[in-house]
Amino acid sequence: MEFGNSLAHLGAGLGAGLAIIGGGAGIGRLAASAMEGIARQPQSTGDIRTTMIIAAALIEGIALFALVITLLLAVK
């Protein structure tokens, strides 16, 4: 194995880890804010939940896109 491939695999591993950490932190912060909003105004639970699910799906999409890029880097 040559040095360039080793660095590509290292970069892919670091990128995958950062993508997962970023996605997890984003969804965690989103859920915490949604819970706080529901606790403050229980009558708007439906609206907050819908908005939270849409935002979580967008965050997951970005994390998945980052993982695909790191997989492409690993098999280059």
Image (cartoon, rainbow, N blue to C red):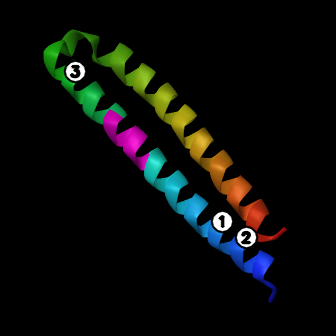
Residue type, label 2 = Ala
Q: Position of residue 56 (x, y in %)?
A: 47, 34
Residue type, label 1 = Ala
Q: In which quarter of the image is the N terminus?
A: bottom right
Q: In this view, does 1 lie above or below 13?
A: below
Q: Are marks 1 and 2 in contact (CB under 8 Å)?
A: yes
In-image side of 13 versus 4 (left or right): left
Q: Name the residue under label 1.
A: 12
Residue 55 magenta-drawn? Answer: no
Residue type, label 3 = Ile
Q: Quadrant of the C terminus?
A: bottom right
Q: Where is residue 50 in the image (x, y as percent from the top left)?
A: 43, 21
Q: From the viewer's perspective, is the residue at label 3 or at label 2 nearer?
A: 2
What numbered label is drawn on residue 8?
A: 2
Q: Quadrant of residue 11?
A: bottom right
Magenta region, residue range: 24-29
User: Could you tell me how many numbered marks the image carries?
Assistant: 3
Distance from the alpha carbon under mark 3 to that under mark 1: 39 Å
Q: Residue at x 72, y 63 (%)?
A: 71
Q: Residue at x 29, y 26 (%)?
A: 34
